[in-house]
Image (tube, grey):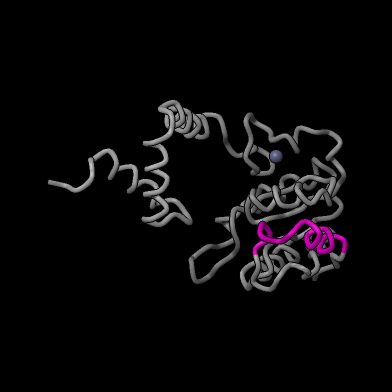
Amino acid sequence: MALLPAALERLLHELTRLPGIGRRGAERIALHLLEAPPEQAGQLAEALAALRREVRPCGLCGNWAEGERCAICADPRRATGQLCVVERAVDIWAFEAAEAYQGRYHVLGGTLSPLAGVTADDLRITELEDRLGPEGISEVILATNASVDGDATAHYLSQRLSERGLRTTRIAQGVPLGGHLDYADPGTLRLALQGRRPLG
Ligand SMILES: [Zn+2]
């Protein structure tokens, strides 16, 4: 006979598939849910279901949104002629927390990565180019991570966009080398944005 009830083992299995949660962490969460008032587990289950039911990528920038457009794209005051290109939506949240930028964003969905087989066609680059004219974009700020792939992607985009006569800038490297934007503190992010320089 199995040591643990099947439903408990199933939850532990699902939890350990999540990033940053090992077996011990999963056991603590499961135990907490067993000991907490029963409605807490129900509320968690409903929140998970609502997440996938109601949240989808913004049709314009790729940020997570509740409708067709995210709150940033839906705000006409954010139409500043600038686009800040990031790898993932979590990077937008970091910039927004730093309150350093008034324009709109564009989520690439990753970086070019020859080793992992990620090519330009796998990223949301065509979608980026489709926005330039209609939104009157005059500057694209390349805010990919300060990693080898992030830098290579920024240079690729800079070249591709400069062929269209567009100004590209790269955020300064106040961000730790190899570091991820979403781990940078707001002050560092603000300085990195202010210290951006032309690229290409
Ligand atoms: Zn959006």
Q: Is residue 88 above or below residue 67?
A: below
Residue 181, quarter of the rendered image: bottom right
Q: Quadrant of ligand 1?
A: top right
| Residue closer to the observer: 85 or 71 | 71
Please give the name of the residue rendered at 72% of the width and 54% of the height, measured from the top-left corner. Answer: 85
Residue 128 located left or right of residue 27? right
Placement of the C terminus among the 4 image quadrants? bottom right
Residue 42, percent from left and from top:
43, 28
Please give the name of the residue rendered at 40% of the width and 57% of the height, measured from the top-left corner. Answer: 22
The overriding secondary structure of the stretch rendered in magenta is helix
Q: Is residue 23 above or below residue 114?
A: above
Residue 52 located left or right of residue 33? right
Q: Is residue 192 magenta?
A: yes
Residue found at the very far front of the displayed protein: 35
Residue 8, percent from left and from top:
29, 41
| Residue closer to the observer: 24 or 92 | 24
Q: Is residue 191 magenta?
A: yes
Residue 10, quarter of the rendered image: top left
Q: Is residue 99 above or below residue 118?
A: above
Please give the name of the residue rendered at 49% of the width and 65% of the height, measured from the top-left corner. Answer: 117
Residue 160, percent from left and from top:
72, 63
Part of the protein shown in magenta: 180-194
Please give the name of the residue rendered at 34% of the width and 47% of the height, measured from the top-left corner. Answer: 12
Residue found at the very far left of the displayed protein: 1
| Residue closer to the observer: 16 or 144 | 16
**Count of numbered labels shown in the rendering:** 0
Residue 137, percent from left and from top:
83, 48
| Residue closer to the observer: 157 or 196 | 196
